[in-house]
Amino acid sequence: MAVEKMPRVPVREQAPEVRAHNFEEVCLGYNAEEAMAEAARCLNCKKPMCVAGCPVNIQIPDFIQQVKEGNFAEAYKIITNSSALPAVCGRVCPQESQCEGKCIRARIDEPIAIGKLERFVADWAKENNIRPVGAETKNGHKVAIIGAGPAGLTCAGDLAKLGYDVTIFEALHKAGGVLSYGIPEFRLPKDKIVAEEVKNVESMGVKIVTDYVVGKAKTIDALMETEGFEAVFIGSGAGLPMFMGIPGENANGVFSANEYLTRNNLMKAYRDDYDTPIFKAKTAVIVGGGNVAMDAARTALRLGADVHLVYRRSLDELPARKEEVHHAMEEGVQFDVLCNPTEILVDEEGWVKGIRCIRMELGEPDASGRRRPVAIEGSEFEMECDAVIMSLGTSPNPLISSTTIGLDINKKKCIIASEETGQTSKEGVFAGGDAVTGAATVILAMGAGKAAAKGIHEFLSNK
């Protein structure tokens, strides 16, 4: 029997000309009526490919069926059986390449708005003061988690449900990791969403210690030998920025996207009631094409800059989410694609005054499968600007690996760990997320934290 076409329920957003001048959330989400209407589009497949496409294996058709029937509390219970951070995932996961990318409905018209439905359920639960709960009794085993980012919070939450005594050690003054310092307020509100998700993890009995730098305050070896932790999960992320190594990169006005976003997000430089120094450029050039580059570009725009994004491949090869690229274009970010910087121009006082680029064309595919950009000889040109923000990726900070005896790393300084269990070369020490893979997505880090929790449980059960 033919399935009737049903258009996807549109999601309300701030108008581009309005949101480009504020840090309020761009997407306004569904209300109950809209969520139930969108849920009614689900085909409730016998073999739901959407579940296979979710790195934390949320039982998507089950929770959507509950939304369809208006049973939002039950929908939240189903989601939180698998995910510790549903309000986050509903906002920042690349659903288009994961769960929604596998949705059978897309063959008929459009995929189900799984992310927006997950966001609605999580927000509804918060508004109704519903939180997940941990185990009723502890099992007597202590586990330490290094880093309160997506991987660490997920691992901690899953272990708490199994009865473990879990403590997270976080280097910064706030928990959340990249959720707090990296993703801007207009995509992921900090007090309204991130802080609440952290409280949900704490409500399961997890203790969070902030301002604690493992590797300096205490090493992992010391935590295990003197503090009684039987297992440790390293979810410390990848916060060490990369640069191009071109002339002028040390000039005043050159920033890593990490520093720029941390000042604005974690330290709230965008707010008048915070005395946080941040350079407000007249013209900013962002170098890169990923989600972090989009975040930096849209942040600089909101801080008053005319913004150019320079990327060495074409628009089709941009690694950022299509939604983020679309929003950036709507807001006025100018995309200078098939260009690559060769030098940052500096004035006599050491400040950025421009950037020199060369035009590129796409050649044969490289190891990633994408066509390799090749410089066009004699095509150099210059752009005036007073700030350059480098968004070229990040690598793990070597502090933990260099202070932990017997912990193997690879050539990229990433910790070597099993993809299935998170087990490292050191007995009782597990790792996952960006510390293992290098910079990736929030949901992949969560999947790694989930796998490690299972690995830790098996390790301690056998021990």
Image (cartoon, helix red, strand yellow):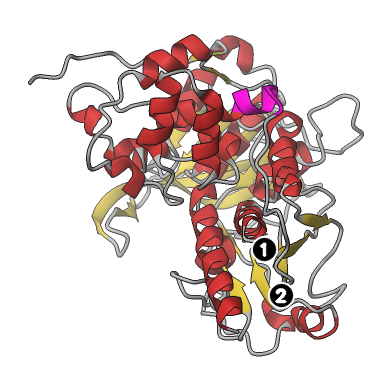
Marks 1 and 2 sit apart, C-alpha to C-alpha, by 9 Å
What is the quadrant of the N terminus in the image? top left
Task: Return the residue nearer the eye: 457 or 115.
Answer: 457
Q: Are marks 1 and 2 in contact (CB under 8 Å)?
A: yes
Circle 1: residue type: Ser
**Label 1: few (<14), some (14–19) or many (≥20) C-alpha neighbours in 10 Å:** many
Q: Work out whether residue 352 can be spotted.
A: no
The majority secondary structure of the magenta stretch comes to helix
**Label 2: few (<14), some (14–19) or many (≥20) C-alpha neighbours in 10 Å:** many
Return the mark for residue 400: 2
Find the magenta span and give its range: 123-129
Residue at 82% of width from left, 40% of height from top? 267
Farthest front residue in view = 137
| Residue 106 forms part of the magenta stretch | no
> Residue 31: percent from the left, percent from the top?
53, 13
Circle 2: residue type: Ile
Can you identify the residue that label 1 sits on? Answer: 236
> Residue 413: percent from the left, percent from the top?
58, 75
| Residue 124 forms part of the magenta stretch | yes
Residue at 68% of width from left, 20% of height from top? 24
Task: Return the residue nearer the eye: 462 or 98.
Answer: 462
Q: Is 221 situated above or below 131?
A: below
Report whether 255 appears left or right of 424: right
> Residue 434: percent from the left, percent from the top?
56, 61
Return the mark for residue 153: none
As helix, strand or loop, the secondary structure at mark 2 comes to: helix
Residue at 47% of width from left, 43% of height from top? 289
Q: Work out whether residue 441 can be spotted.
A: yes
